Image (tube, rainbow, N blue to C red):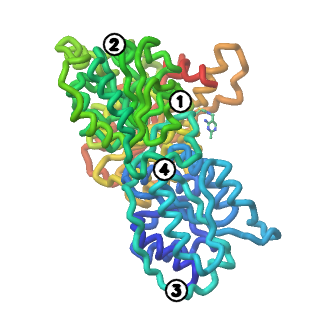
Amino acid sequence: MIVAEAVGRALAACGVGTAFGVVGSGNFHVTNALVAGGVRFVAARHEGGAATMADAYARMSGRAGVVSVHQGPGLTNALTGLTEAAKSRTPLIVLAGEATEVQSNFHIDQAALATAVGAVAMRVASPREAVSRAVEAYRVAVEERRTVLLNLPLDVQAAPFEGTVDVTPPALASAVPAADSSAGASASASGGASAGASGGISAGAAAELARVLGAAERPVFIAGRGARHARRELEELADLAGALLATSAVAKGLFRGSPWDLDVSGGFATPLAAELIRGADLVVAWGCALNMWTTRHGTLVSPGAKVVKVDLDPAAFKTHVPADLGVAGDVARVAEALAAQVASRPGYRSPEIAARVRAEGRWRDVPYEDESGGGRIDPRTLSIGLDDLLPRERIVAIDSGNFMGYPSMFMDVPDEGGFCFTQAFQSIGLGLATAIGAAVARPDRLPVAALGDGGALMGSAELETVVRLGLPMVIVVYDDEAYGAEVHHFGPHGHPLGTVTFPAADLAAIARGHGFAAVTVGGPGDLAGVAEWVAGPRDRPLLVHAKVTAEHGSWWLEEAFKGH
Ligand SMILES: Cc1ncc(C[n+]2csc(CCOP(=O)(O)OP(=O)(O)O)c2C)c(N)n1
Ligand SMILES: [Mg+2]
């Protein structure tokens, strides 16, 4: 056995389920060893896609993600996806060949690249440490929720491995998602698991939170990424405290089905959710940083409201909207402990509020004027139409751009496992690969990728992957023939827009060329073609090429531009 094989076997023995990648000479043997060890390997067509697939897979499966790449350009191609994963504190292991010889065309400082984007760099520096380093990379990824680059120098990889691959997988807390740093905000690079891995709770702070909850008239809970595993505990506590329930975008769906679910807080919040969150006298953020996206630059939190944050990482207490009180610990454990200390009270809950949530709680309940016409469909009408047509057991992945709020707001998801939002780096072009990774993690759900035309064309290397894997995916392209976000940013100031507008591209034909079924939608009537696909046999994925109206920018984008 050579070292590369020992590394692959060791990771397989740790319990890695699926790996993604693009195979070249420098990661051929390690990837084959993963496969020989029982790991499923999914070949992507671009390393950027592979990294994001692994990221989304990890988020939606709760297991570590693995990406395997060639030395040098294989790693540089993966960097945007790796940055997204690192910012999101996704447990991810990147296996990369490494050309340590400086004369090699493939040589770059791979460790420096990894640390520059917030990942942890490790190296198998000698045959002796092949297994121990692989296990350590797995441990750091899962326990500390980090993106770990494991460099495999070419000469060391090829050396004989003398030991045995006798791995006792590290006894780990499950891949509990990290605190929510969400779009635009860097996660702290300091590991941040101080209270977390042990689940230790600061008892004094918890007692203070129990007191505060017992006194609040209008409490609202906002759950973030760090709370995605804690629905039951949070709902039970909210029932006692009379709290209304909301989430950040990455935790969308967490409280679906609760009569007190306000859905997403922030730019995507309904008018009702925004009003009720602003009306809170206590906001408790659970595994949620309360960044500018979740709070509309802080304006959703009333100046008079008390703010409490419960988080694994005490560094989160003072960032973004700062907390008056911070409770360190795992969200589920803190909520459970508090439930024993809080007496039942109505709080913010009343029959009137329940009736309003029922009547106005969803974006589709908010009246709007349908602007469809002239061969183009209003993106709201499109999103509502698709919401009606597509099976509810779905998993929605969203790319970045002006369009992104429409599917996020108008397409419902069954629970927090039905929404995959890779927006911590705000990169366009990750949406399709996100949907693929999520689909691999949740084959029981219909994957829906919502993309802009810019993001769709940027990520189009993976269209073939969708077909090859036989994924029953629906891709919806909101096509405005432009980088709409930029058009609406700069257009009103009279700037020339030739650099951000494009001639029409036949995206349906491109998709058909890959083996998709495709429907071009230029008005509500064309959605019949989607209904036909849904009716079956769904033996090919579907691309919905929607020519959307684009007279003005989206209302949440205006808000977002304040952050630029
Ligand atoms: C990798 C990357 N390049 C450029 C940008 C800047 N950018 C943000 S939104 C956007 C336009 C995206 O266009 P499209 O996907 O068509 O969505 P639209 O805004 O038109 O709805 C661009 C270029 C970015 N965020 N990420
Ligand atoms: Mg566009």
Q: Amino acid at mark 4?
A: Thr
From the image, tell me which residue sits under label 3: 163
In percent of width and height, residue 164 lies at 48, 85
Residue at the extreme front: 204
Which residue is pictured at 40% across the width and 53% down the height? 175
Q: Residue 543, relative to residue 151: is it above or below?
A: above
Q: Is residue 241 above or below residue 492?
A: below
Toward the viewer: 550 or 139? 139
Q: CA distance from mark 3 to mark 1?
A: 48 Å
Comparing 401 with 161, the one in front is 161
State how far apart marks 4 and 3 are (Cα): 31 Å
What is the spatial separation of the Cα atoms under label 4 and label 2, in whole angstroms?
38 Å
Residue at the spot of label 2: 367
Q: Which residue is mark 4?
A: 90
Along the polypeptide, which appears first: circle 4 or circle 2? 4
x%, y% of residue 522? Answer: 43, 28
State which mark lies toward you, 2 or 3: 3
Badge 4: residue crowd in 10 Å (few <14, some 14–19, many ≥20): many
Label 3 amino acid? Gly
Q: Nearer the viewer, mark 4 or mark 3?
A: 3
Nearer to us in this view, 82 or 111: 111
